[in-house]
Amino acid sequence: MNILVWVPNYSLGGGSRLFIKLINTMIANPRVDTIELIMLQKSFDEIKNKVSNDKIKIYVVPQRKTSWIDKGGRIYSIPGTGLLKRVLRESYERKYEKEKKNRILDVFKKSRCDIIYCFWPHSQKFIKARVPIVCTLHDTIVFEFPELGGAYFTNVEKNIIKEWLINSTKVI
C-alpha cells in the first residue's frame, strides 16, 4: 500500500509527538510500501531529523513569507492607507493560497498513492483527489470554547470541518 500523508497544519506540542510516532509506525508496517508526505516548509524543518527512511518521500510546500504588509496599521504611517494595505494583504493571501493549492494538486496527481491521509485538516479547505481521503479531527477546542477565536473564526472552522465530514471517505 502507498500512502500520501498530507499535513496542512502542524502543532509543535502533542501534535508533533503524535505525528512522529504515527509516521514511524506506518513505516514499520510491512503492508506499507511507501509513504509520501506533503507539508509546509516549517513543518518539514521540525521533523526532518525525526523521520527518515527509504520508504519516505517528502514534498515541501513553500511557506508564505511574512512582510511589512502583514503588520497592522498604515503604509509608512500615511493617513488613509490602512484600507489599501488590508486589500493588498488579502490579495497577497489569496495568491499564496491558490499557489499552495496548485502545489498540493500537483502532488496529488503525481503521487502513486492508494489513499490520502490528512493528519490535521483544521483551517484547511478540502481538496478533492482521485483516491479516497481520510482524516483525523484532533481539535474541538474551537467549538467547545468559541470565545477563544470569536464567532467569525468559529463559524469558518465549523464550515471547513463540515466540508471534511461530507467529503472524506472516513473520519478517524
Image (cartoon, helix red, strand yellow):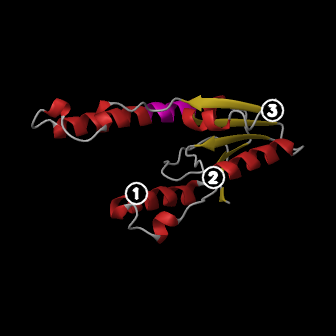
Q: Real-space Cα distance between discs 1 and 2? A: 22 Å
Do the numbered discs 1 and 2 sit on residues whose CB atoms are within 8 Å?
no
For marks 2 and 3 on the same chain, the one whose residue lies earlier in the sequence: 2
Q: Nearer the viewer, mark 1 or mark 2?
A: 2
- Residue underneath mark 3: 53
Splitting the image into 4 quarters, where does residue 103 fall?
top right
* Residue at far right of view: 30
Q: Residue furthest left?
A: 79
Question: What's the CA distance linking mark 3 and mark 1?
Answer: 38 Å
Majority secondary structure of magenta residues: helix
**Which is nearer the N-term, disc 1 or disc 2?**
2
Q: Position of residue 52 (x, y in %)?
A: 77, 33
Residue type indicated by callout 2 = Gly
Determine the secondary structure under disc 2: helix
Image point 34% across, 60% down: which residue?
A: 152
Q: Secondary structure at mark 3?
A: loop
The residue singled out by tag 2 in the image is 15
